[in-house]
Image (cartoon, coloured by chain):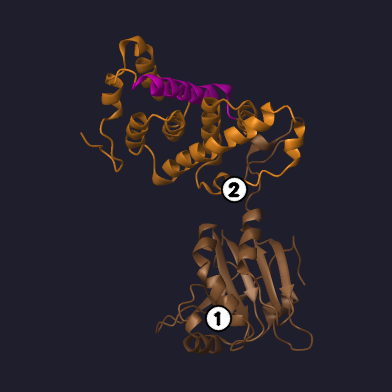
Chain colours: A brown, B orange
């Protein structure tokens, strides 16, 4: 599995972004949210039990993630049509405010090495990626255990409290390059 | 009288300066000369005025400066100058404490304070440093002054340029203290 410090892989996938006719699908790439933090979280299969609760929970926190310049992106190996059907079918997912990536060729999940060896679908993996596309946090749960999005928010907060001010210098240390 | 720009103010900067008490005439005259100097770019000048006014905490002066500055600055620079005042308001207390505490142990404990604006302010990095330095001078954080001055010198900014910004900060801070002195 890709780890902290490695670059998030490049990808180009169809995603289900809304239930509105004509606006349901959108192609999303690793560059679509350039300059923002990204929270990618994957689940094994649409239409299963644990998933809607945590997906909806991420949805409820979406505005707070946006406040922290973070784009949430969900994903599984299901197609964008299955995502659409699931969102139409499940009341908690109807107004989901973030895209659901359709990694139907399993290329992204394979690059991340998060495909479950026996089931062949994505494990419950979460990646927090910084604006320079570096992975800063990885977590993965076994298939039947849900995530706590508040914990992901806590980690993002902690990652964003880098002491960026040169006031943090200690005498004699090498001169800091100002943040771009 | 309303502002000429999008920011509202009851009095323009010029009108407000006319209310400056006689004993502070030097400040009124300094204000016009420090804003008209040639060492700083227009953006640096007015950004420094904005962040200094906010740091100096006189609401009438801040309103008047913001209104005037909005005629000289684009929205990104205006935003960044205000962001500098905001974030340095916090950092000047925090790092000044660490510096003055006499206990080096605090430097080993993470600050756990968000300061993303230092990365995301969206304006010129040198201008932003200058604004942070001006605010630090007003808030008297020695560690911050030394650090931000160091960054500016490292980036090739001249001492004359830096001092020009400090003159603005000094004058604005002083004006902020006297402008309300004559009011009931």
Residue drawn at the location 49% of the way across and 78% of the way down: A17
- Disc 2 target residue: B114
Residue A14 sits in which quadrant? bottom right
Seen from this angle, which residue lies furthest left? B1
Q: Is residue A133 above or below residue A98?
A: above
Front one among A137 and B182:
B182
Helix, strand or loop at mark 1: strand
User: In terms of secondary structure, what is the magenta stretch mainly?
Assistant: helix
Which of the chains bears the disc numbered 2?
B
- Disc 1 target residue: A14
Spatial CA distance of label 1 from label 2 is 34 Å
Q: Is residue B134 above or below residue B116?
A: above
Q: Position of residue A37 (x, y in %)?
A: 59, 61
Indicate which label's residue lies in the foreground, 1 or 2.
2
Is residue A104 at all visible to an observer of this figure?
Answer: yes
Is residue A130 at all visible to an observer of this figure?
Answer: no
Which of the chains bears the disc numbered 1?
A
Circle 2 Cα neighbour tier, 10 Å, few/some/many (<14 / 14–19 / ≥20): some
Residue B174 sits in which quadrant? top left
Is residue A34 magenta-colored?
Answer: no
Residue range in magenta is B157-180
Residue drawn at the location 29% of the way across and 25% of the way down: B16
């Amino acid at each position: 599995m890709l780890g902290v410090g490695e670059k998030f892989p490049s990808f180009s996938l169809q995603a289900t972004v809304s239930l509105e006719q004509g606006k349901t699908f959108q192609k999303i790439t690793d560059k679509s949210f350039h300059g923002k933090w990204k929270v990618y979280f994957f689940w094994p299969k649409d239409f299963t039990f644990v998933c809607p609760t945590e997906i909806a929970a991420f949805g409820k926190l979406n505005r707070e993630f946006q406040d922290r310049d973070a784009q949430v992106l969900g994903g599984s190996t299901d197609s964008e049509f299955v995502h659409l059907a699931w969102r139409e079918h499940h009341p908690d997912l109807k107004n989901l405010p973030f895209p659901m990536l359709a990694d139907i060729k399993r290329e992204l999940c394979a690059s991340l090495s998060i495909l479950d060896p026996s089931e062949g679908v994505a494990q419950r993996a979460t990646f927090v990626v910084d604006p320079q596309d570096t992975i800063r946090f990885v977590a993965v749960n076994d298939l039947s255990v849900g995530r706590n999005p508040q914990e992901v928010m806590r980690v993002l907060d902690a990652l964003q409290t880098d002491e960026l001010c040169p006031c943090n210098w200690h005498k004699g240390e090498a001169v800091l390059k100002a943040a771009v | 009288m309303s502002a000429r720009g999008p920011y509202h103010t009851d009095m323009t900067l010029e009108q407000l300066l006319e209310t400056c008490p006689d004993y502070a005439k030097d400040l009124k005259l300094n204000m016009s000369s420090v804003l008209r100097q040639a060492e700083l770019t227009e953006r640096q000048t007015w950004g420094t005025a904005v962040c200094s006014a906010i740091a100096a905490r006189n609401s009438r002066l801040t309103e008047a400066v913001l209104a005037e500055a909005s005629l000289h600055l684009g929205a990104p620079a205006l935003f960044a100058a205000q962001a500098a005042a905001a974030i340095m308001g916090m950092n000047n207390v925090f790092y000044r404490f660490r510096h003055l505490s006499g206990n080096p142990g605090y430097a080993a404990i993470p600050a756990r304070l968000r300061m993303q604006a230092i990365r995301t302010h969206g304006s010129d990095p040198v201008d932003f440093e200058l604004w942070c330095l001006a605010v630090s001078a007003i808030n008297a954080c020695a560690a911050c002054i030394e650090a931000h001055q160091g960054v500016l010198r490292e980036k090739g900014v001249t001492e004359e340029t830096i001092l020009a910004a400090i003159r603005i900060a000094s004058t604005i801070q002083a004006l902020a203290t006297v402008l309300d002195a004559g009011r009931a």
